[in-house]
Structure formats: C-alpha cells, structure tokens
C-alpha cells in the first residue's frame, strides 16, 4: 500500500488509494485530549486517574466513570439492529473502572432521542440488561430525553460508580522490568468507528457480506459488542498488577498512560479480520491503525515478572511484551509516542 496520490487522476480507484486518517474523518485525538485537559484545568481534580475519578471517602475511594458508544450508533441505525449497543455502553464505562483497579457496583444510563420509538428503546434496554449481567452490575436508574431540536437520531451514554479499598487500586505506574500481559478484544469494540465506517463504505454497504467471514454482514461485524473485563479484576489484584490500560481512543498509545516507559510488544495477540479489512479498504497506514484501534487486544496490564505466569494461568491473557527504559510503544515494527 502507498499513501502517495496523483491529484490529476479523479477516478474511483484513485479515491480509494488516498490513505485515510482518523483526523481527516473528523476525529482528532490530540485535539480532543487538549480540550479535555482544558476542561479539567478549569476546575481542577486532585484524584482523577487516567481512567476514572476517585473521591476519598475515608478508608475507601468512590470511583466514577462516564462514557458513551460513539458513532457505532450510526452502524446500528443503518442496519436497524440496536440489540448490542447497550452492552457497549456498559463496557466502555466498567472497563475504565477496571483499568483503575476498581470494581463497578452501579450504573445509570442516559438516552437522548429525537422522537420516541418503543422498538428501538426496547432493544437498547435488552443490550443494557445483558451488559449489566456480564459486569455483575446494578442499574439504579436512567433518563430518556426527547429532544428533536438537539438530537438527530439518538445518543446513548452512561455513568458507572464503584468502590475500592485504598490499598486495592492499582498504583497506576508500570516499572522497568515488568511483564506486559494482553487480553483479547472482541474486535473493533467502540473506538475508531468514524474511521472504520468511512473506510468500509467507500465501496461496500453495511448489509454486504463481510468478505473475510461470510457468516456475517459488514455491519454485524462492526457491531460486535465491546468485551467486558470485570472478571479479570480479582486475578489482577491478587497477582499484583501495577497498572492497566484499556485500549480505547488513541489505540496503543494508551500504554503510555501507565507511565513514562518504553513498552515493547514483541508477541502481540493476533488482530481480527475486521482490522485487515478496514486497513485495506481505507488504505490506512499501519501506524494510523495502531494509533486508532485496539488491533486485537482490548486490555493490557503491567505486572511484576515473577507473577506474570500466575496471572496468565488464571485468565485468558498472554504475555505480549515487557517494560523498559524509554518513552514509546514498540509494536509490529512501529514506534509510537
């Protein structure tokens, strides 16, 4: 593949040869992070971790995380399948708490919609119920707002709360010599969908058969729900995990949230076929893919070397690399910083 284009040629094949980037499709991760930093600076937060906010309530922390499903909702609308996006909403929240070392306990959802639709809301509710069961979580309530002048279609988000003893949360900083253990994703999860949608719809419809798996359509493949990692929390705590990274927006650069180190991934987990398809259809560079998507690994932890084998034995994790001196992520011949 090449990122070079001939601007004098305007045929469809040339259009496909133009390599897509996440920023060009409308999502600039660096600008988003700058905006978030500016927001936090306005009021300050002494106990905000990389993934959740922590409130000191004595001998424990009260933790909060909030997130939504993003433009994955547009795929659901396109194929009129809303049955799994509730799982995504739960997952995107609880996984952030897990990355801080906190067990989620309760959840509230927020649905903004342009007009009431019983069938859509029922399917969303079914997905939320599945996600709650998978995460062993209680739904305390929620809000449905009908706002035709504000929302076109609908948006789904939620907030999750958890409790953790102060000595149970992760340190948040990996140490040189630690081993990196990775846990498989279910596929594309709920990040990078703006880039993925632009790539796959250049020459395909969501209802087309997915060429790399004829059992599903392209839309169904994109809608595979985000994996929920709450079941990993107990073995991670027991085996002394120091820090964790939920591989979401920003892709593999999320590992840098575990501290200023060099993260060497020399045995990465395999990427599911959807990533190969998105890269080919959008002519996306390998670096852009790894800066945008999880590429087959949805969660990574840094654990002391003497406890890595025990953690792997108790979970479906695999040793994928190590922590060294430096300030980058080294994976598949790429150096990300």
Image (spheres, helix red, strand yellow):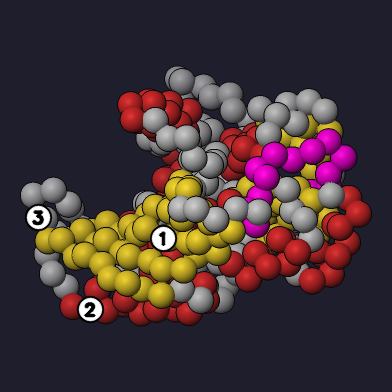
Q: Is residue 207 visible to the viewer in this orientation of the structure?
A: no
Compute the Cα span from label 3 to label 2. 18 Å
Q: Disc 1 vs disc 2: which is toward the camera?
A: 1
Query: Which picture quadrant has residue 10?
Result: top left
Say above or below: 10 vs 307. above
Q: Which residue is mark 2?
A: 119
The residue at the point 28 percent across, 71 percent down is 141
For the C terminus, the quadrant is top right
How many numbered marks are there? 3
Task: Determine the residue positioned at 12% across, 61% down.
Answer: 146
Q: Nearer the viewer, residue 174 or 164?
A: 164
According to the picture, the residue beneath numbered tag 1 turns out to be 160
Q: Which residues are magenta?
A: 168-180
In the rendered structure, does residue 9 fall within the stretch colored magenta?
no
Q: Which residue is mark 3?
A: 148
Looking at marks 1 and 2 on the same chain, the residue that comes earlier in the sequence is marked by 2
The image's mark for residue 21 is none
The quadrant of the picture occupied by the N terminus is top right
Answer with left or right where residue 226 lies relative to residue 297: left
Is residue 190 toward the left or the right of residue 329 in the image?
Answer: left
Residue 177 percent across, percent down from the top left = 87, 40
Classify mark 1: residues with Cα within 10 Å, few (<14), some (14-19) or many (20+). many
Q: Nearer the viewer, mark 1 or mark 3?
A: 1
């Amino acid at each position: 593949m090449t990122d070079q284009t001939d601007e004098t040629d305007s045929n469809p094949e040339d259009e496909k040869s133009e390599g897509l980037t996440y920023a060009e499709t409308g999502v600039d991760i660096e600008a988003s992070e700058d905006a978030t930093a500016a927001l936090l600076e306005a009021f300050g937060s002494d106990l905000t971790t990389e993934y959740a906010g922590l409130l000191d309530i004595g001998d424990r922390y009260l933790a909060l995380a909030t997130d939504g499903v993003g433009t994955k909702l547009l795929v659901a609308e396109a194929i009129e399948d809303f049955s799994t996006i509730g799982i995504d909403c739960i997952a995107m929240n609880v996984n952030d708490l897990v990355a801080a070392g906190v067990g989620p306990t309760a959840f509230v959802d927020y649905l903004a919609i342009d007009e009431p639709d019983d069938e859509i809301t029922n399917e969303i509710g079914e997905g939320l119920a599945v996600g709650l069961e998978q995460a062993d979580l209680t739904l305390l309530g929620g809000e449905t707002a009908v706002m035709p002048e504000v929302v076109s279609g609908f948006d789904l988000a939620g907030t999750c709360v958890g409790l953790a003893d102060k000595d149970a949360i992760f340190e948040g900083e990996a140490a040189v010599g630690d081993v990196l253990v990775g846990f498989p994703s279910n596929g594309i999860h709920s990040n990078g969908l703006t880039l993925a949608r632009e790539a796959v719809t250049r020459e395909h419809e969501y209802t087309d058969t997915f060429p790399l798996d004829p059992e599903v359509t392209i839309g169904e493949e994109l809608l595979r729900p985000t994996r929920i990692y709450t079941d990993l929390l107990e073995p991670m705590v027991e085996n002394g995990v120091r820090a964790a990274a939920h591989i979401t927006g920003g892709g593999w650069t999320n590992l840098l949230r575990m501290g200023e180190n060099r993260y060497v991934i020399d045995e990465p987990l395999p990427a599911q076929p959807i990533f190969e398809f998105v890269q080919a259809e959008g002519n996306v560079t390998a670096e852009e893919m790894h800066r945008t998507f999880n590429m087959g690994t949805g969660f990574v932890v840094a654990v002391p070397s003497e406890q890595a084998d025990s953690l792997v034995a108790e979970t479906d994790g695999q040793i994928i690399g190590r922590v060294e001196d430096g300030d980058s992520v080294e994976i598949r011949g790429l150096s990300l910083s």
